[in-house]
């Protein structure tokens, strides 16, 4: 197993919820937390990228900290705590980077110093167990905080390599904004099934024409883990009005109101992009 920086062990559970990038959508975060608790989870974990895209970033961090939700560091938390010049999102296209810079500059200027210091102390990885299944939570991938693990381009061979190198059965991540899961090895010989769970994002819709956002529940089951993706309705109209009042780009508001991505499109692989409108 490869060594990792700032790793923590959360314990053993039967049923947990995972929140992907919140992107300052504090309204969806509050709704998701209440919904997860109503669904009788043992714990809730947040996998980074708490700022970006939406308004009033401190409201999201206030909620996370006051609720006692265990968190790990995403590229946004790394960049904000390091006083970086950009979000370290991993984009290469100029249009993607243009909107990422607008989002990061807004978030950085409105995130309090004490929240930035807290972000710098967050662990990179979190481990837990679900029944007999070893789970490793990260932001992008265990290798790199801003690596994109897409459904169409993450091969079984590469996933198997990650699981082997980092000594886990289930890899739980976010960063792409699109939720998906895949099991690549069935339970056998007393060993649990192995695979990946990308929990998607709470911060913006999943580029599917629906205004809800999503989180994931993972539950220990015979031979492995059962995964459920949970849609979260929230007052997206209010969020869009607040985004407008804060001077955030019109394109960001359109995504919130329509459920279709209008930015950060160039990073999408062909299959994922073809599923959207633009």
Image: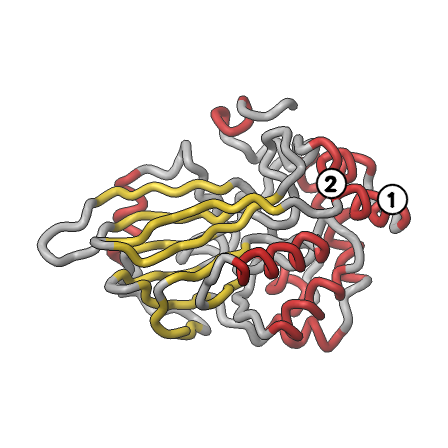
Please give left or right for residue 105 compared with residue 219 in the image. right
Q: How many marks?
A: 2
Q: Residues within 10 Å of mark 1 (few under 14, many from 20)?
A: some
Residue in view at x 82 percent, y 36 percent: 250
Q: Residue at 71% of width from left, 35% of height from top?
A: 255
Mark 2 or 1 closer to N-term?
Answer: 2
Q: Which mark is residue 235?
A: none
**Mark 2 vs 1: CB contact within 8 A:** no
Q: Nearer the viewer, mark 2 or mark 1?
A: 1
Instruction: In the rendered view, tell whether residue 264 sits above or below residue 100.
Output: above
Q: SS for tag 2?
A: helix
Q: Residue 150 appears at what percent x and percent y? A: 45, 39
Task: In this rendered view, identify the residue nearer to me: 162 or 12.
Answer: 12
Image position, residue 4 (x, y; %):
39, 68
Tell me if residue 120 comes above or below residue 15 in the rendering.
below
* Quadrant where the N terminus is found in the figure: bottom left
Mark 2 neighbour class, 10 Å CA radius: few under 14, some 14 to 19, many 20 or more? few
Q: Give the image quarter of residue 274.
A: top right
Q: Would residue 189 appear left or right of 174 to someone viewing this image?
A: left
Q: Is residue 116 visible?
A: yes
Work out whether 227 lies above or below 155.
Answer: below
* Residue at x 34% of width, y 41% of height: 182
Indicate left or right for 181 with 195 as reference: right
Query: Between 212 and 244, which is closer to the camera in this rendering?
Result: 212
* Residue named by callout 1: 244
Quarter assignment of residue 164? bottom left
Residues at marks 2 and 1, CA–CA distance in whole angstroms: 18 Å
The reply to whether residue 82 is visible in this rendering is: no
Q: Residue at x 81, y 63 (%)?
A: 110
Please, is residue 84 above or below residue 70 in the view? above
Disc 2: which residue: 98
Residue in front for this viewpoint, 246 or 7: 246
């Amino acid at each position: 197993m490869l060594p990792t920086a700032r790793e923590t062990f959360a314990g053993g559970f039967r049923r947990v919820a995972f929140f992907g990038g919140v992107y300052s959508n504090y309204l969806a975060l509050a709704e998701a937390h209440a919904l997860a608790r109503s669904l009788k989870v043992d714990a809730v974990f947040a996998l980074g990228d708490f700022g970006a895209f939406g308004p009033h970033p401190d409201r999201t961090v206030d909620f996370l900290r006051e609720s006692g939700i265990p968190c790990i560091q995403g590229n946004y938390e790394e960049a904000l705590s390091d006083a970086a010049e950009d979000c370290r999102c991993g984009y290469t296209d100029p249009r993607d980077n243009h909107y990422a810079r607008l989002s990061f500059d807004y978030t950085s200027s409105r995130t309090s110093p004490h929240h930035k210091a807290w972000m710098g102390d967050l662990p990179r990885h979190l481990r837990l167990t679900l029944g007999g299944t070893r789970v490793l939570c990260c932001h992008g991938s265990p290798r790199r905080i801003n690596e994109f693990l897409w459904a169409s381009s993450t091969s079984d061979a590469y996933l198997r390599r990650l699981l082997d190198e980092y000594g886990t059965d289930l890899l739980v991540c976010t960063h792409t904004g699109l939720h998906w899961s895949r099991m690549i090895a069935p339970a056998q010989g007393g060993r649990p099934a192995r695979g990946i769970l990308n929990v998607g994002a709470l911060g913006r819709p999943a580029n599917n024409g629906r205004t809800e956002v999503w989180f994931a529940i993972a539950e220990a089951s015979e031979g492995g883990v059962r995964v459920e993706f949970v849609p979260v309705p929230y007052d997206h109209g209010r969020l869009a009005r607040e985004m407008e009042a804060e001077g955030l780009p019109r394109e960001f508001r359109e995504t919130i109101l329509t459920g279709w991505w209008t930015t950060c499109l160039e990073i999408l692989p062909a299959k994922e992009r073809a599923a959207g409108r633009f």
